[in-house]
Amino acid sequence: MFIDRAKIKIKGGDGGDGHVSFYRAKYIVNGGPDGGDGGDGGDVIFRADGNMTTLMDFRYKRAFAAEPGESGGKKNRSGKNGGDVVITVPVGTVILEAESNKIMADLTGDGQEYVAISGGRGGWGNAHFATSVRQAPRYARPGQKSKGFEVILELKLIADVGIIGFPNVGKSTLLTMITNSKAKVADYHFTTLSPNLGVVRGKARDFILADIPGLIEGASGGAGLGHEFLRHVERTKAFIHVVDISGTAGLDCSPLESVGKINAELAAYDEELLSRPRIIAANKADLLAPEDAERLCGEIRAACPEYRVMTISAAAKTGLGELMAAAEELLKNAPEVTFAADYEEYLPEEERAAAVSVEKQGDTLFSVTGGAVRKMLALTNIDTEKGFAFFQRFLREKGIIARLEELGAKDGDTVKLYDVEFDYWK
């Protein structure tokens, strides 16, 4: 079974909490702070593996979490860092954030890695907060929480030449005859439900040939195999468009009309696909008289002068050597397919915003959001008196208190910072 799309949950490891402790030993009455730091949480890493061909593994396991860091200990002992979780995926896998459908990464090379979520940093022990004035700090910094969200894994086939065309026109037969591929062949639509690959030994270079699942009219709108077909077509450098000129495929259109319908579906999905180098292979020519085969090919040549049209018979193995030589020549000048590699690390929208947002949401309720606010909440223990005082100073320095006053905040009103709420007092 070929699985080319999966949704999974990923979660980075939380950082371990810093520790609060003081040195104790015989004859030492007031030892200094010796609380250790928490360990860093593990990362979530995707790694492309050239030996994987499907996303089938993700049918059975759909949640992945890195290990959290351990909390710090006495005597300045730091907590152990959490282990990373490495998720192996096939080469050609695109990783998208499920909620926004934003592309996070496109893994196009064997061994390529992408850190989807960084683990939370470990918190500081109270030893970090000792100064000449504050010699016995009784608070530590908690570990930073890591993110967790759903991602979509989408496998897009990477091949040099893709064999396209309507179902039952001889694509799988062509692949079988010129490579060692064992493609399933039968006289009914959608025999090929997943891409088949083969390697062609050319004169100057070898290249990968892919038999892409059959396309029907309306596929760009999701009909039939729809986008399952088109998702793989966009990853090939050039096309061999197989057309049945014998009329035995059971299509309700002429060979020339079938070319137009395939072009229409490609253009509806992505007009750039029409500019890819292409050869039209007029297949099953052995079932026609030579003059009829030449007449039908002539009609296609006249209507599509931008494409080279070649007469072949995959079943009879005629014209296949010339077709592969032409395909190899086509690849010499074929431009490299550009992938969606310009991506950014996924962050929730409020974290991407540089500015802090202060909004009035009711007569007595105010909301404060922003990446700096979320980060400060994660790194400050506001349950302690000194920690809360430090956080209040942050609010004042960032102009949040002044903004609350501008919006008319009064004593006793509620200020909400994500999951934290407190009463406002001047």
Image (spheres, rainbow, N blue to C red):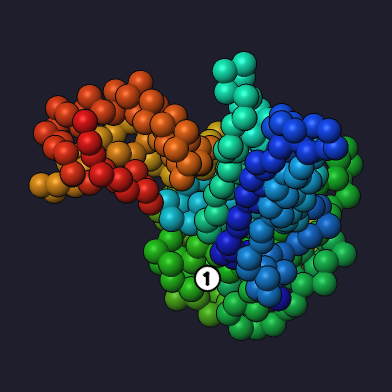
Image location (x, y in percent) of residue 90 = 73, 56
Viewed as shown, does residue 71 lie left or right of 222? right
**Vertical side of 218 occupied by 43: above or below:** above
Quadrant containing the N terminus is: bottom right
- Describe residue 317's horizontal placement relative to residue 345 as left or right: right
382, 112: nearer the viewer: 382
Instruction: Identify the residue at image location x=59%, y=63%.
Output: 8
Q: Residue 304: in sight, yes or no?
A: no
Assess disc 1: are there few (<14), some (14-19) or many (≥20) residues with their C-alpha within 10 Å of its C-alpha. Answer: some
- Can residue 88 be seen from the camera position used here? yes
Residue 167: image x %, image y %?
58, 72
271, 388: nearer the viewer = 388
Q: Secondary structure at mark 1?
A: loop
Does 161 appear above or below 379? Answer: below
Q: Residue at x 14, y 47 (%)?
A: 364
Q: Nearer the viewer, residue 104 or 61?
A: 61
Q: How many marks?
A: 1
Which residue appears farthest toward the top when viewing the image?
Answer: 132
The image position of residue 19, as x and y in percent, is: 67, 42
Amino acid type, callout 1:
Leu
Q: Quadrant of residue 139?
A: top right
Residue 309 percent across, percent down from the top left: 62, 50
The residue at the point 37 percent across, 48 percent down is 420
Front one among 122 and 165: 122
Q: Which residue is mark 1?
A: 225
For the point 66% across and 36% down, which residue is it? 125
Left or right: 422 with respect to 262? Answer: left
Which of the 4 image quarters holds residue 241?
Answer: bottom right
Q: Quadrant of the C terminus?
A: top left
